[in-house]
Image: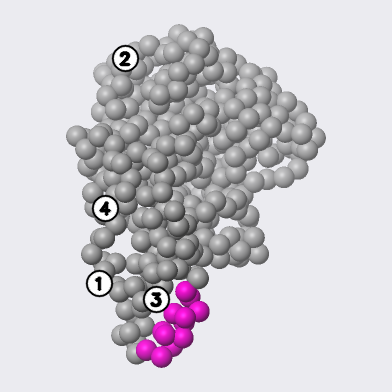
Amino acid sequence: MQSRRNILRGLGVAMATPWLESGAFGATGGVERLAAPPLRLACIFMPNGVWPDHWTPAGDGEDYEITPHLKPLEGLRSEFLLLENLWNKNTVGRNGHWPKVPAWLSGGFVERTTGGDLDSGGTTVDQAIAQKIGHETPLPSLELGIDAPRTGIDTAGGGFPRALGSFLSWADPKTPVAKEIVPQLAFDRLFRNKKRPVVSGADPKSPEVLASLQRDDSSVLDAVLEQAKSLRAKGSKTDQARLDEYFESVRSVERRLEASMKPQKRWINDGKYPLDRPVAGTPATHAEHVRLMLDIMVLAFWTDSTRVATMMMGDAQSSQDYGFLPGVKGNFHGLSHHRDIPETRAQYQAIINWHTTQIAWLLEKMKNLKEGDGSLLDHSMILFGSSLNCGNRHLEENLPLLLAGRGNGTLRPGRRVRFEKKTPFCNLHLSLMERMGVKQESFGDSTGTLPGLG
């Protein structure tokens, strides 16, 4: 069989645009279509905890009060479970931030090291799932974030490497999975034709990022590009515009050919997802950056590019300035230590409410994407929360957590579910793994799966 490169080189610039637009390769590109939408899992991390009085409601079951932190989600209360009394016991009595992040999805005991020999204590649940089912999609998993990884040792906070709090996903205790923080690169990961390393540099104009962008833009179309350049130079503006459309059509065919060579069963949604390729670099504002990365995550699920994703809305000790919010003057971490001063605490609360507003936007978007017999949200599980209960006091018990979506009919949202105090968070992870088709006896410090989710 000819390679994809040889096939397209053979087609060359003589291939007519109308032929390309006729859809000769078919909508599915030869990939066998799944009979029903697959289940997706996203784990979205918020740093610096919450103010418990504004998170934990009164009431039980479906009859509970909407607290100020949950107010942005009030119109979506039928779409999520509020989970209580889960914790990671291995994070107790240690640093307030850095080791709690890798433990959030693994339950592992994070070791103090000098930074050169990281040990997160375990594989995270997203990667445990991706290692089992990741071969079913072009990307085994997608890791997104906002902040570039930090370096050095946090000597003021127990001597833990800051890198521990810079990565949410861990392939094993020694190997963090790099997150992508540049929207264009994250977008291109969904459609690229050959693997490339994630670039998480702080400077989007760095040589590494620019080189990666160049690789993403390259394709087998480059084999005929020199001929095409001379042809384009001789044409009128109209001809040039048509040729540009032609280039994009060739890339579209290339992607379909790539898909046709993979023995995968994929879910194919009808219609185009409303997101164009982001411009190079990072958005001008933090708010735009977060929304765009969440949008890319939804696109990844919508196109069945992956079924497992993580998103860090900030690293372990995020000092993001939220001065763009009314009445807020200061950074997230600094304001989290409000010392119960009402004016400072109100600013901290506003930042938490901003985060839950982003989650409400995400859930609303997924709910409105019709898919199969329901919506994209119906066919997903969206875990959102923090590795701290109280940001001011670094408390570990009763983590602030919600689980949205219907998990392909395996979850019954719209309720507050209180488990026994100090129930392992890993019991939830084991339950999520089971729903994603990965069955094993235990995970981390789990003692079993969680009852009452369905």
Q: Mark 3 or mark 4, which is nearer to you?
A: 3
Mark before the other along the chain sequence, 3 or 4: 3
Identify which residue, 231 or 446, lies in the foreground.
Answer: 231
67 over 426 or under it: above or below: below
Pointer 1 and pointer 4: residues touching (CB < 8 Å)?
no
What's the residue type where badge 2 is placed? Asp
Our reading of the magenta stretch's main secondary structure is helix
Real-space Cα separation, disc 1 to disc 2, in angstroms: 61 Å
17 over 201 or under it: above or below: below
Pointer 3 and pointer 1: residues touching (CB < 8 Å)?
no
Query: Dot 2: few (<14), some (14–19), or many (≥20) neighbours within 10 Å?
Result: few
What's the residue type where badge 4 is placed? Ala
Query: Disc 4 designates what residue?
Result: 27
Mark before the other along the chain sequence, 2 or 3: 3
Query: Disc 1 designates what residue?
Result: 18
Which residue lies at the image location 63% right of the left edge and 37% below the top edge? 176
Instruction: Tell me, yes or no, whether the highlighted magenta stretch contains residue 234.
Output: yes
Query: Disc 2 designates what residue?
Result: 60
Residue 99: image location, x then y, percent: 65, 29
Identify which residue, 60 or 272, lies in the foreground.
Answer: 272
Real-space Cα separation, disc 3 to disc 4, in angstroms: 23 Å
Which residue lies at the image location 54% right of the left edge and 18% below the top edge? 443
Helix, strand or loop at label 4? It is: loop
Query: Disc 3 designates what residue?
Result: 13
Q: From which residue to which does the magenta span run?
A: 224-235
Residue 414: image location, x then y, percent: 28, 24
Mark before the other along the chain sequence, 1 or 4: 1
Q: Mark 2 or mark 3, which is nearer to you?
A: 3
